[in-house]
Image: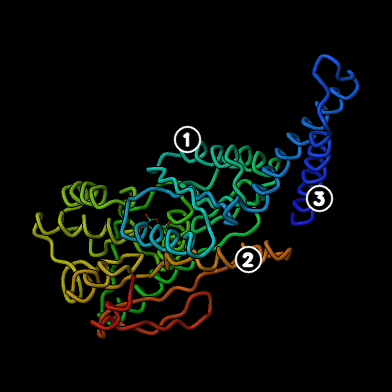
């Protein structure tokens, strides 16, 4: 990029000095100026104009006049505390102070709007596109367009199933999160002497890889253990959605359930309101074991207060790792295709039990004020 910039600059300078040379000669009266000389001047003027255009283009290629790396980020939306933390982290990392010019689009959980956002980044000619895919499928066409435009795509958080036209994915292992919740429940129920599990699941946005992994992971353990999953319905990862689904569950399954699994903290907050209104007690030592995912600050506060029995983290701070991927690409290297962000599992002391996932022993973190303080 630098070489190209220097060569077009030189062309411009040479053409300009040629023009200056012509202009410097004692001007002949216009009428007498030989046609050839006029043509020569016009040609040089054209060359200068073209060179100027090329300079502008090369400057743009080299990261804009300000030298910033341009990044477009098509974010899922603003449905949860997790999402707020993810957005903040991206905006902090891809700041001007850090050498980036970020185009951020909140896609409001609208799949079509998300594809449009990506296409607008292609039109802008950004250097890199980051996508947190609302759902896992339907991506190949737009990713082919990114590929054709020569713009590297990095996928953050949720995964894409039907295309491999991206450089790297950085995120959490949702299937492991779901299995961890299931294996924890098995160990915790044993400790509590609970022999029968009748579970209700409030799922995330259907078709998102976070929903698919968590639902499949938990259900795998439920099937293996012969538990009853009474029902599973989506709350779309929102507090309002969680409350609405739980209100209907409380009516349909009154007195029949002893476990509620919410696929994120915000759904759990909504489910807690619905259970409060229906007079159902939940949390350690109460009628219903409440399991949640994300473990953002507000979620851990509910663990500490004895509402959520165990919270399975999904770390939203993947942006620094994505910046590392961009650094590798800028240096001409090949980043890893998949980079996992590690997660922790949280509960109060009494709900901390030993369990393993796929043969790997897991450890849990006891929720204290300091732990909450340190969380995002
Ligand atoms: O769990 C939920 C959010 O994609 C992992 O999306 C993310 C999920 C997260 O809305 O709170």
Task: From the image, tell me which residue sits under label 3.
Answer: 7
Percent position of residue 331, x then y = 70, 66
Q: Name the mark nearer the viewer: 2 or 1.
A: 2
Task: From the image, tell me which residue sits under label 2.
Answer: 327
Mark 1 CB lies closer than 8 A to ligand 1: no
- Do tag 2 and tag 1 residues touch (Cβ < 8 Å)? no
The earlier-in-sequence mark between 3 and 2 is: 3
What secondary structure is found at the residue carrying circle 3?
A: helix
**Vertically, is 131 above or below 286?**
above
On residue 112, the disc is: 1
Q: Name the mark nearer the viewer: 1 or 3.
A: 3
Question: Residue 41 occupies which quadrant of the picture?
Answer: top right
Instruction: Give the total number of marks visible in the rendering.
Output: 3
* Side of 211 where 332 appears, left or right: right
Q: Name the mark nearer the viewer: 3 or 2.
A: 3
Give the distance between the C-alpha atoms of the residues marked 2 and 1, in whole angstroms.
30 Å
On residue 51, the disc is: none
């Amino acid at each position: 990029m630098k070489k190209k910039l220097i060569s077009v600059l030189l062309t411009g300078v040479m053409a300009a000095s040629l023009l200056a040379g012509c202009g410097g000669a004692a001007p002949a009266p216009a009428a007498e100026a030989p046609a050839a000389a006029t043509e020569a001047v016009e040609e040089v003027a054209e060359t200068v104009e073209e060179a100027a255009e090329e300079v502008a283009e090369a400057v743009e290629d080299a990261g804009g006049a300000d030298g910033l790396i341009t990044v477009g980020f098509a974010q899922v939306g603003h449905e949860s505390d997790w999402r707020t933390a993810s957005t903040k982290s991206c905006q902090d990392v891809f700041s001007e102070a850090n050498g980036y010019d970020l185009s951020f689009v909140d896609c409001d959980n609208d799949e079509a709007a998300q594809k449009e956002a990506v296409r607008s980044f292609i039109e802008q000619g950004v250097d890199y596109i980051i996508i947190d895919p609302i759902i896992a499928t339907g991506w190949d066409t737009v990713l082919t367009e990114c590929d054709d435009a020569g713009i590297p795509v990095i996928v953050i958080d949720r995964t894409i199933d039907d295309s491999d036209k991206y450089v790297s994915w950085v995120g959490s292992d949702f299937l492991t999160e779901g299995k961890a919740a299931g294996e924890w429940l098995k160990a915790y129920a044993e400790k509590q002497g609970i022999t029968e599990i009748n579970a209700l699941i409030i799922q995330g946005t259907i078709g998102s890889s976070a929903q698919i992994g968590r639902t499949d992971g938990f259900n795998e353990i439920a099937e293996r253990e012969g538990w009853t999953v009474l029902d599973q319905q989506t709350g779309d990862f929102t507090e309002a959605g969680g409350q609405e689904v739980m209100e209907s569950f409380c009516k349909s399954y009154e007195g029949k359930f002893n476990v509620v699994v919410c696929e994120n903290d915000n759904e759990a907050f909504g489910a807690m309101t619905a259970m409060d209104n229906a007079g159902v007690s939940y949390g350690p030592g109460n009628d219903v074991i409440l399991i949640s995912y994300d473990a953002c600050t507000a979620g851990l506060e509910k663990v500490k207060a004895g509402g959520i029995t165990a919270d399975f983290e999904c770390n939203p701070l993947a942006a620094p790792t994505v910046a590392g991927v961009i650094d590798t690409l800028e240096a001409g290297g090949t980043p890893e295709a998949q980079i996992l962000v590690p997660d922790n599992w949280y509960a109060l002391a009494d709900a901390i039990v030993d369990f393993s996932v796929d043969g790997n022993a897991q450890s849990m973190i006891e929720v204290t004020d300091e732990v909450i303080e340190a969380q995002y």
